[in-house]
Amino acid sequence: MNTKTKTTLPAATEPPRLFLCIRGDAGIRRMTVPSYEAASNAVREYIDSNGLGAGCSDDGWAFHLATITSVDRKQKLATVSYNGRVWSCVDGAEIKISAAQGLTIAAGERK
């Protein structure tokens, strides 16, 4: 008997429901976001509004990590780096975000 269950993904026309968790010396911020682009913007706003550096800055306040998970599946999907770039947790490729083209995954390795 097959005990595996199928996972149903949302239809392509449905907006993604993502959960973003940002960690830094200014504290943890958790929120739902509608897209990878919104997650990227939220991370940059958090960094800028708290004056955080990418690592050890003169005042010691730094940005640590931002992760994006599926709200429904609780699966880690991507990370957002200090510069706002989004990286797939599946293969490490950059997820390119373009308002004109929508979401695409870049070919190549994480650099």
Image: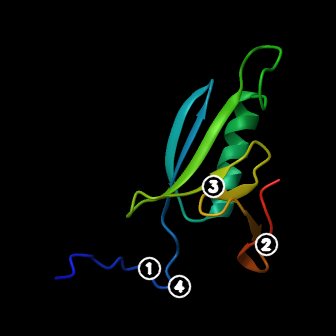
Say the numbered circle drawn on residue 39.
3
Q: Which residue is mark 1?
A: 10
Q: Tell me what residue is drawn at x 65 percent, y 33 percent.
A: 64
Mark 4 is surrounded, within 10 Å at the Cα level, by few (under 14), some (14 to 19) or many (20 or more) other residues, namely few
Q: Residues under labels 4 and 1: Cα distance? A: 6 Å
Q: Position of residue 3 (x, y in %)?
A: 21, 76
Q: Position of residue 99 (x, y in %)?
A: 76, 73
Q: Quadrant of the N terminus?
A: bottom left
Position of residue 95 relative to residue 64, above or below, is below
Q: Tell me what residue is drawn at x 80 percent, y 67 percent.
A: 108
Instruction: Say left or right for 19 vs 99.
Output: left
Amino acid carrying label 4: it is Ala
Amino acid carrying label 1: it is Pro
Say the numbered circle drawn on residue 12.
4
Q: Residues under labels 3 and 2: Cα distance? A: 21 Å
Say the numbered circle drawn on residue 103.
none
